[in-house]
Structures are given as C-alpha cells and as structure tokens.
Image: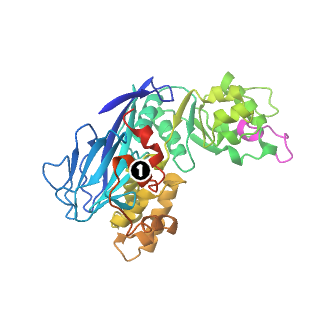
Amino acid sequence: MGEPLPGMSSGLGDAALRVRQLVAVFAPDRQLPGPITLGDSPLLIGREPSAALVLEDVDVSRRHAEVRYDGIADAWVIRDCGSRNGLWVDGVRVGRAPLVHGTVVKVGRTLLVAVDALVAAGRQLRSETQALRGHSVAMQQVRGEIATLASQRIPLLVLGETGVGKELVARDLHERSGRSGPFVPVSCASIPSGLSDGEPFGQTVGVFTSAVASRQGLFGQARGGTLFLDEIGELSAAVQSKLLRALAMGEVHPVRSAQPAQGDVQVIAATHRDLAEDVASGGFRADLYSRLAGWVLRVPPLRERREDIIDLAHAVLERWRGGKLALSVSAAEALLLHDWPFNVRELEHAIETAAVRAEGDAIIRCHYLPPSIGDRARPHQGLQLRDVRSGELAKGTESLRGKVPEVAGRGRR
C-alpha cells in the first residue's frame, strides 16, 4: 500500500510513495522470506502455511503474532497471539506494541525490522554493488542517483554523517563516469592554513621558503579525473575564494603564476556539516555553495536503514574469516538495537573486534561485541509489557528507543 507524500530533496520530483513493510533480516539458517507490505487487512506471522509471513523457525509458533492497523492509535500494531516464546519489540517482551520505522521485532529466533520505504517519483532503484552494499530502498536510491549522475558533468555535494561512506559514493561515481584521469581524494581539514593557496592550486619555485620546485597542486593531479573534497565545510575563506573561481571559470591559477591552468576536473565535495546553515551564519560562501550543490546527494545514516545492518555484518565476517563465523541471535539483536553514531565504520570495527574475541569459537556471541553494543541487548531480559491497549500505546511503550512520540506522525497520513 502506498501513499503520495511531499517531495524530497535532490531535485528528484515533487512526490514520493511511502510503503510500510516488515522485513526479515536474521534467521538461524539465513533463509529469509521476502518482506510483507502492511495494508488494511490483518497479517499473520508464524509457521502456519496460510500466514502472510511464514517463518521456518522451530521456536516460532504456528500463529505467533498478528499485525493490524489501529485506527485509534493511528498506527500499525503488532500483538502476540499467545505464542510459547513470546513477542519481543526493541528488546522488550510485549503483548502489543506499535510498529514504526526502525522497530526491531523478535519472534522465536527470527529478527524483523519495520520499514517505512520512501520511493521518490522518478528516482531509480539499483541493486546492491560491492562498493555500496545494502538492500534497503534508501541505498537503492543512492545507487540510482549515482547511475543518473555518472554520465553528467554536474558538481555534486554529498551530505552525510561521519562513517556513512561519502568517499565510497564519490569513488563509485568516478568509476562509473568513464573519466580517464585519476580519483584524487583530499581532506580539506588537513590543508595547513599557511600553505592553503599552494596546496590545492599548485605553486612555482620561490613562492615559499620551502618551495624549491614547482608542483601541480590538487587540481593538476586530478586533471581529466575527479577531485574529491572531503569535509568541504572546513575550508578557509581564502581557499573558498580560489575554489569558487576554479568552478566558475573552469580554470585555476597556481600561486605566482601568470598563466591559468585549465581545470578539466569533476569536483565532488562532501561534508557532515549543514552547509546551508553555515551559509546563513556567514561561515561559508553562498556563491560557492551554489556552485558545489549542483546536485545534493544525502547518504542515510545506518540507524535509518536498520534492515541493512545484518547484511553488512555478514559482509565483514566474510572478509575476516571467509564466512566461517556466524552471528548468534542475541548478537544480531544487539547490532539491530544499537544506534551507530559512527555508522558503517563503527559497525565494521565492532564486527572485527568481535571476530578477534571469538578466536576458537564459530559463533559471534553477544559478549564478544564491544560493551557499548553488546550490553544494549541484555538489560531488558525478564522485562515484560504484557498488554498495551489502543489508547495507551504511547504511554506504555515510551521506553522503546524514544520512538513512541512519533507514532501519531507515522500513521497513514
């Protein structure tokens, strides 16, 4: 079931389609059924062949749980149908609870994630690649935008939190573009202020005490290819001015050089900052922002695409020990419940740490994970929320990762 919603950023059209789904992300045998889309009719989850979501898990009851729309709460709600092992939502055993985007559900030893999938009108969806993994609609949309931009000469601004993979996006676009020149990444935060003019644009002999030879600078190195300016919001005002000229005129002026150098360079900038806010406060040039943001691509944080977490963890384990390590259900649940402030980078480090601690064991168990993650799944053991009536959904589930205040806004509007 889908509904038209207000448009999204990045120039991708004026409307979007929202589809709510329940996605299986973990099962002991890794045999996962396809997602189910929530609609007006009640949906049964269990081992019964007639169930909407059939789970081949011996710890799942024949009629384990049911999902239906609750008009009073204006939300989809999941309830326990008297299962022998209970229904767990966000680490708490419940009788009944709302399903909002990112809700983690455990039935037996199978883990599900509730997803609000937003599909913008005209936006392409692309399957998973080695560089940019994830089956979520959010990542499919990112890959679709890259495919659209690959053949275009449009300045790109990539926005996203630390660790989401902004450089991977830039590299993937460069490889797809067919440009013959190199991919040159640079951290703008690392350019020394004293040498900031010479570093990006080159210099001639004698400009500085240490300038004993001419050098191309970053634009020269990237000629015919792609210059990736990471953390563009950290550039000094002086370098912002020179970069603006390079983008506006298609040329750069090496320091103390009378001749401009032509800049056949695709520029991709990235930042974790809110550049529009920096422009409003005077910290970043508005004219440079307008040049860089020919197209704005937002890479979603991991907490907004929890359905990708287990697949990403398995990919790390495949690289680490050739897939010979498996996740326990408690470890998988802990990964899903963590909010990942440092995103994919943090996930990779957590799985690598757990793999080292699991030396001699074939299973990644919860206590092998870093304490900040592994402890997340344990405090709720023994807690129960047996029944939450329709009018008390928000009050009764307030502890579920702070999601309940969103229930009214996450209904069928």
> Quadrant where the N terminus lies?
top left
What is the span of residues highlighted in magenta in the rendered image?
198-211
Q: Position of residue 272 (x, y in %)?
A: 60, 43
Q: Position of residue 69 (x, y in %)?
A: 30, 41
Q: Determine whether the residue tagged by mark 1 lies in a helix, strand or loop.
A: helix
Near-viewer residue (131 or 218): 131
The answer, for residue 220, to whether it is visible in the render is no
Q: Is residue 330 above or below residue 13?
A: below
The answer, for residue 372, to whether it is visible in the render is yes
Q: Which residue, as the protein is rendered here, is positioned at the far bottom?
A: 360
Q: Relative to residue 329, is residue 152 drawn left or right?
A: right
State the residue at coordinates (76%, 26%).
259
For the stretch drawn in magenta, the main secondary structure is loop
Colouring mode (rainbow / by chain / secondary structure / one colour)? rainbow
Near-viewer residue (229 or 214): 229
Picture mark count: 1
Does the stretch in magenta take in 206? yes
The residue carrying mark 1 is 306
Q: Is residue 400 above or below residue 193?
A: below
State the residue at coordinates (72%, 40%).
235
Q: Position of residue 212 (x, y in %)?
A: 81, 45
State the residue at coordinates (52%, 48%).
164
Going by the numbered disc 1, the residue's amino acid type is Arg
State the residue at coordinates (43%, 49%).
394
Q: Relative to residue 56, is residue 350 drawn left or right?
A: right
Q: Relative to residue 278, is residue 13 drawn left or right?
A: left
Near-viewer residue (211 or 228): 228
Q: Is residue 214 above or below residue 242?
A: below
Tell me the quarter of the picture where residue 2 sits.
top left
Q: Position of residue 412 (x, y in %)?
A: 36, 34
Q: Residues within 10 Å of mark 1 (few under 14, many from 20)?
A: many
Does the stretch in magenta take in 58? no
